């Protein structure tokens, strides 16, 4: 995994865990195309938060 992928997935995991917590593993995802602005970490963080919110909604 290259640095760009690693940075994205670190952000995704941090966002996921901020919503769901560490007990539920994050889903397998692919690296999306780069956005025009913002870092890969922030892109991952935002996507992780969104995925976490969806997971919580499924569990309720």
Image (spheres, rainbow, N blue to C red):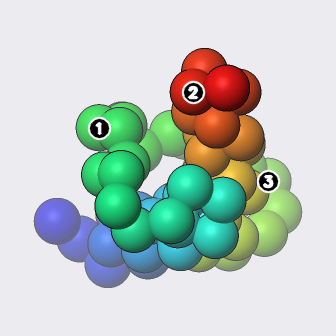
- In percent of width and height, residue 1 lies at 17, 65
- In percent of width and height, residue 15 lies at 62, 65
Label 3 crowd (10 A; few <14 / some 14-19 / many >=20) = few
* Residue at mark 3 to residue at mark 1: CA–CA distance: 24 Å
Q: Residue under circle 2?
A: 59
Q: Decide if residue 27 is on the left or right side of residue 11.
A: left
Helix, strand or loop for disc 3: loop
- Earlier in the chain: of badge 3 and badge 1, it is 1
Q: Residue under circle 3?
A: 36
Q: Which mark is residue 28?
A: 1
Q: Decide if residue 4 is on the left or right side of residue 2.
A: right
- Mark toward the viewer: 3 or 1: 1
In this rendered view, identify the residue nearer to me: 59 or 41: 59
Identified at 36% across, 51% down, the residue is: 24
Identified at 64% across, 70% down, the residue is: 18
- Earlier in the chain: of badge 2 and badge 3, it is 3
Identified at 64% across, 37% down, the residue is: 56
């Amino acid at each position: 995994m290259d640095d760009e992928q690693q940075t994205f997935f670190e952000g995704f995991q941090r966002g996921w865990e901020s919503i769901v917590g560490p007990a539920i593993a994050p889903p397998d995802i692919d690296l999306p195309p780069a956005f025009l602005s913002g870092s890969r970490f922030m892109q991952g963080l935002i996507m992780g938060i969104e995925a976490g919110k969806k997971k919580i909604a499924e569990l309720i």
